[in-house]
């Protein structure tokens, strides 16, 4: 299978960062300098997750849009009690993706978390266009300028 599973113990407050090559390789930057730039941007003081995102995108997305889409997903860990955890055994088959999504939606819907996730997805889609506006800013007005690495 093209995927492997792994289990890690992460202390509360750990910032989990998932990203694509298009983020660290924006503007034909090599991977190693891109990873160093990402590490510097993540290490910069930032009181909120949105500020962390601004640090990262401001540092890495400084030039014209790349041919490769960049994506960034941040999550901060915190402990959960047993009632907040769900676990499913799914077949090793790409066809189960829709079923697993439906399971997650049914589990999250009563908590209101799915509504928050859906709102965030819509906000991100509207706010982080891959094409800057005529003013050089994203639709949210935050722009893509900032520190370069």
Image: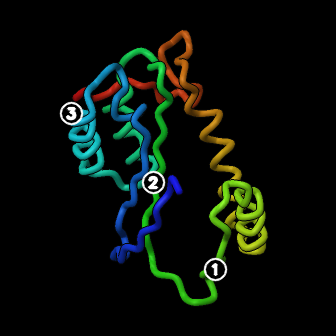
> Crowding near pointer 2: few (<14 within 10 Å), some, many (20+)?
some
Q: Which of 128 and 4 is in front in this view?
A: 4
List x then y, in percent, for residue 145: 37, 23
Q: In which quarter of the image is residue 144?
A: top left
Residue 121 shown left or right of residue 102 in the figure: left
Q: Give the structural element (helix, strand or loop) at label 3.
A: helix
- Mark 1 highlights which residue? 86
Q: Give the structural element (helix, strand or loop) at label 1.
A: loop
- Residue at the (50%, 57%) spot, across then down: 3
- Mark 3 highlights which residue? 33
Q: Residue 147 carries which label?
A: none
- Mark 2 highlights which residue? 74
Task: Determine whether 55 is above or below 87 in the image.
Answer: above
List x then y, in percent, for residue 46: 33, 51
Q: Give the structural element (helix, strand or loop) at label 2.
A: strand
List x then y, in percent, for residue 15: 37, 61
Task: Determine whether 71 is above or below 107 in the image.
Answer: above
List x then y, in percent, for residue 62: 35, 23
Number of the front mark, 2 or 1? 1
Q: Which of 112 and 149 is in front in this view?
A: 149
Q: Nearer the viewer, residue 75 or 104?
A: 104
> Crowding near pointer 1: few (<14 within 10 Å), some, many (20+)?
few
Number of the front mark, 3 or 2? 3
Return the disc, 3 or 2, that comes first in the chain's sequence: 3
Q: Quadrant of residue 101?
A: bottom right
Q: How far apart are marks 2 and 1 (CA)?
A: 21 Å
Q: Distance between the residues labelled 3 and 2?
A: 20 Å
Give the tally of numbered discs. 3
- Residue at the (52%, 18%) spot, across then down: 132
- Residue at the (34%, 34%) spot, across then down: 24
């Amino acid at each position: 299978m093209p995927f492997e599973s792994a289990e890690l113990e992460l202390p509360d407050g750990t910032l989990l960062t998932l990203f694509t090559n298009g983020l660290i390789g924006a503007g034909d930057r090599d991977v190693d300098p891109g990873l160093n730039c990402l590490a510097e941007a993540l290490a910069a003081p930032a009181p909120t997750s949105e500020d962390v995102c601004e640090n990262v995108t401001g540092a890495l997305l400084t030039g014209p849009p790349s041919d490769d889409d960049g994506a960034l997903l941040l999550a901060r860990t915190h402990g959960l009690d047993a009632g907040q955890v769900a676990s499913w055994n799914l077949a090793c088959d790409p066809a189960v993706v829709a079923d697993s999504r439906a399971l997650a939606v049914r589990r999250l819907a009563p908590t209101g978390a799915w509504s928050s996730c859906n709102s965030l997805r819509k906000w991100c889609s509207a706010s982080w266009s891959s094409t800057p506006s005529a003013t050089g800013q994203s639709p949210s007005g935050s722009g893509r300028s900032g520190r370069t690495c």
